[in-house]
Structures are given as structure tokens and as C-alpha cells.
Image (cartoon, grey):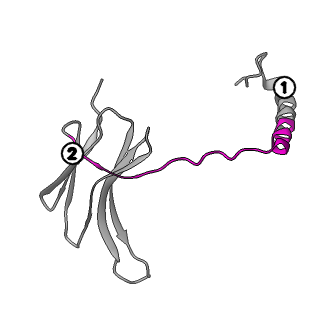
Amino acid sequence: MENNLGFEIHHNGKHICRAGVEDKLFVVSCIANSVSRKLGDKPTDLSMQIGGLISESFENIVWSDFDLKLGDTIDVEVIDDKFSPYTVTDVWLPPEPEALTKEEIAHKRIELQKLKEELAEHLDEDGELRI
């Protein structure tokens, strides 16, 4: 199995982190932000965020978050090992589906039957859509 890939980050020549995740499905991102909230004003937020998501557990993770200023340099190298530890900042849990009433279930059954009738010529003998 190949190693996962990540990023080694340096800010003005100073090592910040080796952002990456071993043995899991994930997202790793390095985002430089320049935010201006009023036309003509200087940016009110100039920052760098290095973080991501552990896909299986919906954990938001972070390695670093720091301010930037004019003239700063950010170096990013793609790496595949010796990742720095991350911090879990939040866990997003998908909402539980709401329970349907008996009336809603009956209505959905009627809708399903209508769809089956409309698609009948495109369904196989098991009721699966033929492509």
C-alpha cells in the first residue's frame, strides 16, 4: 500500500508542520486567506490555515492557524511520511433523519408506485434501472 500524501509547510523559512494523515480517509488543506470586508479597505484578515477532515469519523482537524503580513513567504512541499500530530477541533455528525408519519409513508409509497409505472420500460426484471 502506498503512503498517504500531505504537505510540509514553512513560513518565512520557519518549519510549521508536516500535515498529513496515516491509514485513514482524509482531506488535508492549506488555505491562505486575504479577506476585505469593505471595498477599498486593506484586508482585515490575512492568515494561513492548515487543517482538514478525517472522513470516516467526521473529525475536523488542525495543525496550525497563523496570521500573515505583506512580504511573508509560504513554502509547501508534497510529502508522504513523518506527519506531524494534529488536533481534533470539532466533530460533525450528520443529523438523524426525522421519523415519517404514517400519512407521509403512505404518500411516498404512492409516489414510488407512480415512478415505477413511469420508468417501467427502463427497469429490468428485478426492478433495477437499466442504463
Residue 36, position as x, y percentages in the image: 39, 76
Q: Amino acid at mark 1?
A: Ala
- Callout 2 crowding tier (Cα within 10 Å): few <14, some 14–19, many ≥20: some
The answer to whether mark 2 and mark 1 are in CB contact below 8 A is no
Quick one: SS at disc 2? Answer: loop
The reply, left or right, for residue 45 in relation to residue 95 is left
Residue 105, position as x, y percentages in the image: 81, 40
Highlighted magenta segment, given as a residue range: 83-110
**Quadrant of residue 84 within the rendered picture:** top left
Residue at position x 37%, y 83% from top?
41
Q: Amino acid at mark 2?
A: Ser
Q: Earlier in the sequence, mark 2 or mark 1?
A: 2
The reply, left or right, for residue 95 in relation to residue 31 is right
Q: Nearer the viewer, mark 2 or mark 1?
A: 2
**Which quadrant: the N terminus?**
top left
Q: Residue furthest bottom?
A: 40
| Residue linked to disc 2 | 84
| Residue linked to disc 1 | 120
Please check the rendered image and state whether residue 117 is part of the magenta-colored stretch, yes or no: no
